Image: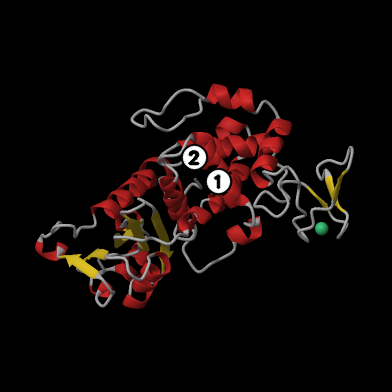
Amino acid sequence: MTKNAPGRNDREGLTIIDLFKMFPDDEAAEKWFEDQRWPEGRKCCPDCGSMNYAVVANRRPMPYRCRDCRSYFSVKKGTVMQSSKIGLQKWLFAMYMMSTSLKGAASMKVYRELGITQKTAWFLTQRIREGFKKGNARSMIGPVEADETYVGGKRGNMHASRRKKFEGRGTAGKTAVVGVKDRASNAVSAKVVSRTDAETLQGFVADNADPAATVYTDDARAYKGLPNHESVSHSVGEYVRNQAHTNGIESFWSLMKRGYKGIYHKMSPKHLDRYVREFAGRHNVRDSGTLEQMAVLSCGLVGARLRYRDLIEDNGLDSGARAIAV
Ligand SMILES: [Zn+2]
């Protein structure tokens, strides 16, 4: 736990050697997950909230029994790991890979490194992504930069009939993403949106930024009418005027798109929101040490749920089913 990542002298990295020493087996990983979830040591029943429980000998995988509601539980219960047969050491190693890779870790890599099936790795990484969501919600004091971008959907790769449908629209076949970046804290919040009208974009700004925060945007019409708003006219070549610019959120978009192209190759519209929140969640803890990043992520897993059938269920967006799952 001594090496610093290049360029970040003040954050504490964790080498893969350290990781193996700290978590040689599932028991060590389970202890760590328990310490994150119940830092005082006393467990809390995920079903009824009672702290009156008994440790049950030889009752894996549910080592605790609630004396009030009589249900058995483990650290996995009530988290995205519930019902998972994957050992906690593998969960932790996958979280390590996804936390330490700036542009994300493709499930193809996780599958090879952990010796699990490709399908299991894909489901595992999608569930870990749920854990990054909590790191998105925050109140930004500002000034904030707000912007939207479009991801995916190269027309050249599209089937001719589909291409025809989108002809003539600049954002053809792409999925819209809106984001805000707080200059005060450097935090980013972003999500997929189905429309880029004023109601949607301004609603997103209002959900994340303090009403008194100054908001900088480009000259897109949808932002007109925001309180404390200043814009730069990208359409006439103006990118920076005094403090008014959107360079911060744009650099976040460019990192996300480098991950999209270089690591994931394809993020289907259906699952894009999870990737977007992963990038924002990781961005928001990037100055923390690796173990702390993993601790934040483990907190995000609590209260989250993603069942396989919900993951593959149609949500009205293109699944990109012909592409290789990443
Ligand atoms: Zn209970």
Marks 1 and 2 in Cβ contact (< 8 Å): yes
Q: Nearer the viewer, residue 11 or 153?
A: 11
| Residue 253 visible to the viewer | yes
Q: Position of residue 75 (x, y in %)?
A: 72, 46
Q: Left or right: where does residue 282 sit relative to residue 178?
A: right
> Circle 2 is placed at which residue position?
99
Q: Secondary structure at mark 2?
A: helix
Q: Amino acid at mark 2?
A: Ser
User: Is the CB of the residue bearing disc 1 within 8 angstroms of ligand 1?
Assistant: no
Picture quadrant of residue 287: top left
Q: Nearer the viewer, residue 297 or 67?
A: 67
Q: Left or right: where does residue 48 sit relative to residue 321?
A: right
Picture quadrant of residue 67: bottom right
Q: Left or right: where does residue 60 sit relative to residue 288?
A: right
Q: Position of residue 270 (x, y in %)?
A: 49, 60
Disc 1 residue crowd, few under 14, some 14–19, many 20+, Cα 10 Å: many
Q: Is residue 9 above or below residue 40?
A: above
| Residue 116 visible to the viewer | no
Q: Residue at x 27, y 65 (%)?
A: 214
Q: Residue at x 46, y 52 (%)?
A: 275
Label disc, if present, on residue 297 of the rendered structure: 1
Disc 2 residue crowd, few under 14, some 14–19, many 20+, Cα 10 Å: many
Picture quadrant of residue 241: bottom left
Q: CA distance from mark 1 to mark 2?
A: 8 Å
Label disc, if present, on residue 127 of the rendered structure: none
Q: Quadrant of ligand 1?
A: bottom right
Q: Is residue 139 above or below residue 247?
A: below
Q: Is residue 53 above or below residue 150?
A: above
Figure disc tally = 2
Q: Secondary structure at mark 1?
A: helix
